[in-house]
Image: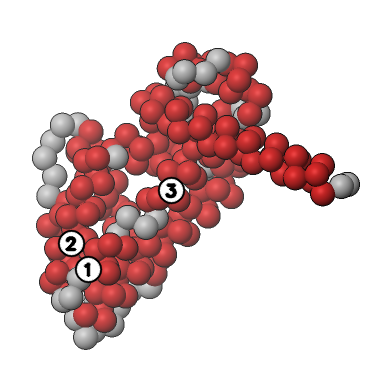
């Protein structure tokens, strides 16, 4: 293959990847509104600006589209607490900043978080989802552990739980708050997250 043909081939691959990313972004809203069980590619197309044929050209089925779209969202989300970690100069500052950030993303991105939990639940039944779900879960676990480790450092303490336990605790707290938020109820997530953080180190 000549240098010119290689360049053309790379450009084609880049355009294909860019188009997939655009399609995923445009369909995230439809996916987050309807959930996995209630959607097909045709229904997603009806709620987006793209035809069913276009979606089917770039994605084999809704499993591929859903996992791709959620992974794109998570690329941004797994760094959502890094700013709070970097800005905090004391354990109390980090506790407050982390709690506020967690409550903020609950309000701003509730539909997308609901889609993530839907995908994770579906992975219990759909083997095709499991590799992506496990990878995303690992990234989320690392995200939470960065906060816990920094909090312990600022508090001159050490974590009293393992990384998986810390993640499970915050994930459970967040999922419970999400359910109440979607039901139109007030939550105390910011305060609860701060309180939980204090219990994970000694």
Give x and y (percent) for residue 103.
19, 49
Which quadrant holds residue 31?
top left
**Residue 137: mark:** none
| Sequence-wise first label, 1 or 2 | 1
| Sequence-wise first label, 2 or 3 | 3
**Residue 87: mark:** 1
Q: How is the image coloured?
A: secondary structure
Give x and y (percent) for residue 161.
33, 74
- Is the residue marked by circle 3 packed among few (<14), some (14-19), or many (20+) residues within 10 Å? some
Q: Quadrant of the C terminus?
A: bottom left
Q: CA distance from mark 1 to mark 3?
A: 22 Å
| Sequence-wise first label, 1 or 3 | 3
Which quadrant holds residue 34?
top left
- Is the residue marked by circle 1 packed among few (<14), some (14-19), or many (20+) residues within 10 Å? few
CB under 8 Å between discs 2 and 3 = no
Q: Which residue is mark 2?
A: 97
CB under 8 Å between discs 1 and 2 = yes
In the image, residue 79 above or below residue 57: below
Element at badge 2?
Answer: helix
Question: Which circle, 1 or 3, is nearer the viewer?
Answer: 1
Give x and y (percent) for residue 136.
48, 52
Give x and y (percent) for residue 11.
69, 40
In the image, residue 36 above or below residue 189: above
Q: Which residue is mark 3?
A: 74
Observer able to see residue 126 = no
Q: CA distance from mark 2 to mark 3?
A: 20 Å
- Tell which of 78 and 35 is nearer to you: 78
**Residue at (43, 48) in percent of width and height:** 74
Q: Image check: 184 left or right of 119?
A: left
Element at badge 1?
Answer: helix
- Is the residue marked by circle 2 packed among few (<14), some (14-19), or many (20+) residues within 10 Å? many
């Amino acid at each position: 293959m000549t240098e010119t043909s290689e360049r053309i081939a790379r450009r084609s691959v880049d355009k294909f990847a860019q188009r997939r990313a655009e399609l995923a972004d445009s369909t995230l809203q439809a996916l987050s509104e309807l959930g996995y069980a209630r959607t097909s590619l045709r229904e997603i197309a009806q709620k987006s600006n793209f035809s069913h044929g276009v979606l089917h050209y770039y994605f084999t089925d809704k499993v591929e589209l859903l996992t791709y779209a959620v992974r794109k969202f998570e690329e941004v989300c797994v760094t959502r607490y890094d700013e709070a970690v970097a800005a905090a100069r004391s354990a109390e500052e980090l506790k407050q900043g982390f709690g506020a950030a967690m409550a903020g993303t609950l309000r701003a991105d509730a539909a997308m978080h609901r889609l993530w939990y839907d995908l994770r639940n579906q992975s219990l039944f759909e083997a095709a989802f499991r590799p992506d779900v496990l990878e995303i879960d690992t990234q989320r676990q690392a995200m939470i552990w960065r906060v816990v480790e920094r909090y312990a450092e600022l508090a001159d303490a050490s974590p009293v739980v393992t990384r998986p336990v810390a993640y499970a605790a915050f994930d459970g707290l967040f999922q419970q708050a999400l359910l109440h938020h979607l039901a139109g109820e007030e939550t105390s997530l910011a305060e609860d997250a701060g309180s939980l953080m204090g219990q994970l180190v000694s």
